[in-house]
Amino acid sequence: MDVPVDPRTSWGLAAPGALPRTADLEPLVTRVLAPNPSGMTLDGTNTYVVGDPGSGQAVLVDPGPDDPAHLAAVESALTARDARCVAVLVTHHHGDHAEAALPWGAHFAAEVAAASADVAGPRGRVLSHGDRLPVAGTTIGVVATPGHTADHLAFRLESGAVLVGDHVLGRGTSVVTHPQGDVVAYLESLRRVHDLGPSALYCGPGPALTEDPGAVLEFYLAHRAYREHQLLTALAQGPATVDELVASVYAEVPRQLWPAAAQSTRATLAKLRAEGRVEGGIEPGAGAPVRLA
Ligand SMILES: [Zn+2]
């Protein structure tokens, strides 16, 4: 199996750390970058300000960290759009996306909406796949995209752009968490977003993907298949622990990302175990190594 080639390598995307703090992506969308860069959040969390420019209203998607400087930047973006925040939407429960949801919802007196009641809060709205939200002079479609986490949503805009949270990252590939994430669901979610024919993918972290979003989704599918192939190839040499498999399969990835790689590896092994192709200890601390069934 050939190593899948990431189509973005030839796109000339902004280098890591070079994204502007605030950027107008299209008439419906302004992106505000939160000041929380890390190995997992890349440049930092992207907060999206979405609304029809003439509506005087906007929705925040993924408010991100509850950080005063970030709130000030978002309020400046709202002012520049001559809009007030009327709702806060959240792609999934991870703190780098959701931490500010309830405090900022209260600050703006705006409804918070997410797939999880924990994130939406006691007065919030719980969203489901297929919901259509008429808000801020436009309509936002709710697309269930479980995989990275069980509660992950994407939001489809009238322009055809899709806000994908951590389902697809602007750089590199995403993590299927374990035990909550699910590789089979993740692959189905990638195909679901692909089937939408998105005009752009606006990612949780990293640059906007506008040149050929479908090619990125195809690369993600091929990348997952390749990782699975690598694990099966490694296990054909003999039983191995998850840590040994990560050291072998992710040898080219910086070590700071190995804990995340271990989660994706466990998630992939869980899929293979459910298919009856491997057996042994997958969970953290499991004594028995993994082996081919
Ligand atoms: Zn996440």
Image (spheres, rainbow, N blue to C red):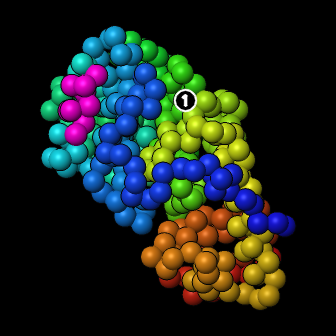
**Quarter the C terminus occupies:** bottom right
Q: What is the span of residues highlighted in magenta in the rendered image?
A: 73-81
Q: Position of residue 138 (x, y in %)?
A: 43, 15
**Circle 1: is it few (<14), some (14-19), or many (20+) Cα within 10 Å?**
many
The amino acid at mark 1 is Ala
Decide if ligand 1 comes within 8 Å of the CB at mark 1: no
Residue 77 located within the stretch drawn in magenta: yes
Residue lying at 50% horizontally and 68% vertically, measured from the top left: 260
Q: Position of residue 208 (x, y in %)?
A: 50, 42
Secondary structure character of the magenta stretch overall: helix
- Residue placed most toward the observer, 167 or 36: 36
- Residue placed most toward the observer, 67 or 277: 67
Q: Check the image and report above or below for 208 versus 83.
A: below
Q: How many marks?
A: 1
Q: Check the image and report above or below for 100 versus 27.
A: below
Residue lying at 41% horizontally and 28% vertically, measured from the top left: 29
Q: Check the image and report above or below for 105 versus 275.
A: above
Q: Check the image and report above or below for 186 versus 82.
A: below
Left or right of 260 on screen, residue 216 = right
The residue tagged 1 is: 161
**Quarter the N terminus occupies:** bottom right
Tell me the quarter of the picture where residue 161 sits: top right
Residue lying at 44% horizontally and 50% vertically, measured from the top left: 205
Residue lying at 52% horizontally and 19% vertically, measured from the top left: 158
Residue furthest right as drawn: 1
The reply to whether residue 144 is in sight is no
- Residue placed most toward the observer, 267 or 210: 210
Q: Position of residue 253 (x, y in %)?
A: 56, 75
The reply to whether residue 215 is in sight is yes
Q: Position of residue 25 (x, y in %)?
A: 44, 32
Residue 270 located within the stretch drawn in magenta: no
